[in-house]
Amino acid sequence: MDLAQLTRDLEALAADAAGAVAGAPDVAALEAVEVEVLGKKGRLTGVLRGIGALPPEDRPKVGAIANTVRTGIEAAIAARRLVLGESELEARLAAERIDVTTPARPIRRGSHHPSIEAMGEIAEIFGQFGFVTLESPEIEDDRTNFQLLNIPQDHPARDLWDTLYVDLPNRLLRTHTSPGQIHAMRTFEPPIRVLLPGRCYRYEAIDASHASEFFQVEGLMVDEGTTLGDLRGLLDSFAHAMFGAGKRTRFRPGYYPFTEPSVAFDVECLVCGGSGCAVCGRSGWLTILGAGMVHPVVLRDSGLDPERYQGFAFGMGPERIWMLKHRINDLRLFLENDLRFLGQFR
């Protein structure tokens, strides 16, 4: 091989490379051309192997031509890479373009749990009569949960509460919100008007109308000259505000150790309108709470003189109230995480 032949080969290589570079459709194809022409085993390396057969005086001439060819090819590749890169960027931007005027997906808003909604509405209604909402402990001692409420150790009424005890001396999870009465009467001077909502705990089976963990709302009013008639008027007003004006109500005799006399408060069945159905047991009435006049023993245990002060108390389950108001037939729905149910009451 002579100088002229190597020169022609290099010129042919430069021409072929220029065509391949210009025709590369994308960066990947361009990189393949670069490896084929300028790689360690590329065409340029193959041509330059013939330099060793040339006379020593011709070798620098071929080297100079080869450097010019390499530089030209590298410049062409760099220019083509810039063009292809810009084109690919424009294509990607076009494909990923976001129309900022397109309406966004609706944001799912949370809501209060229906038990919280129910307690909020109960508090709003009684708040119109001057009742303020207070918190009381969920872990109580036996004395406050039972004894100060006229339920001594051997009292048969203890069988009405299936108690859960905790791993602390003489401590238990409160079985009702009534212990809050003791805290309120020992904290405030009469006149007292308080609501005491909160969780309660009992060891019992869960079914359509019972749960082992549930909410209660306790109400307490203590003043001079408080009567059972005041209690009846207040509860009538509450029932009409919660369930609708004109709903019939009634008192029935009941029993609670911490009230005397004790009553059950019923409202006309919301499903059948009082004509009798399966929901109300064909009676036309639904019990929504228990109530009564605060027992003199409880007043005295709370540091108040029962000769001077009288009071009444009532306790209701907000879930039960909400079940009646919205015709919900299973208490267990409040304990599950079905958003279709929980989101209805926002």
Image (spheres, rainbow, N blue to C red):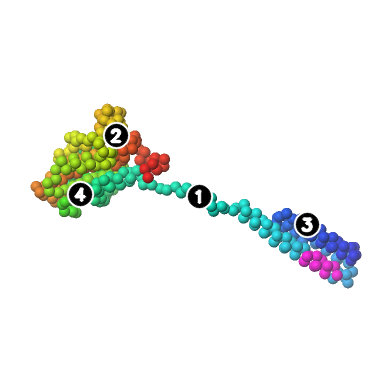
Q: Residue at x 15, y 46 (%)?
A: 311
Task: Provide the secondary structure element on which disc 2 rests.
Answer: loop
Quadrant housing the N terminus: bottom right
**What's under tag 3, amino acid-wise?**
Ala
Task: Using the image, tell me which numbered label, if any, was put on residue 104.
Answer: 1
List the single residue furthest toward the left: 307
Q: Are marks 3 and 2 in contact (CB under 8 Å)?
A: no
Q: Range of the magenta residues?
A: 61-72
Task: Provide the secondary structure element on which disc 1 rests.
Answer: loop
Name the residue carrying label 3.
20
Residue 3 in magenta stretch: no
Comparing labels 3 and 1, the label whose residue is closer to the camera: 1
Q: Are marks 4 and 2 in contact (CB under 8 Å)?
A: no
Q: Is residue 173 visible?
A: no
Which numbered disc, 4 or 2, marks the residue that appears first in the sequence? 4
Q: Residue at x 56, y 52 (%)?
A: 99
Marks 2 and 1, Cα distance to the nearest angstrom? 42 Å
Marks 1 and 4, Cα distance to the nearest angstrom? 49 Å
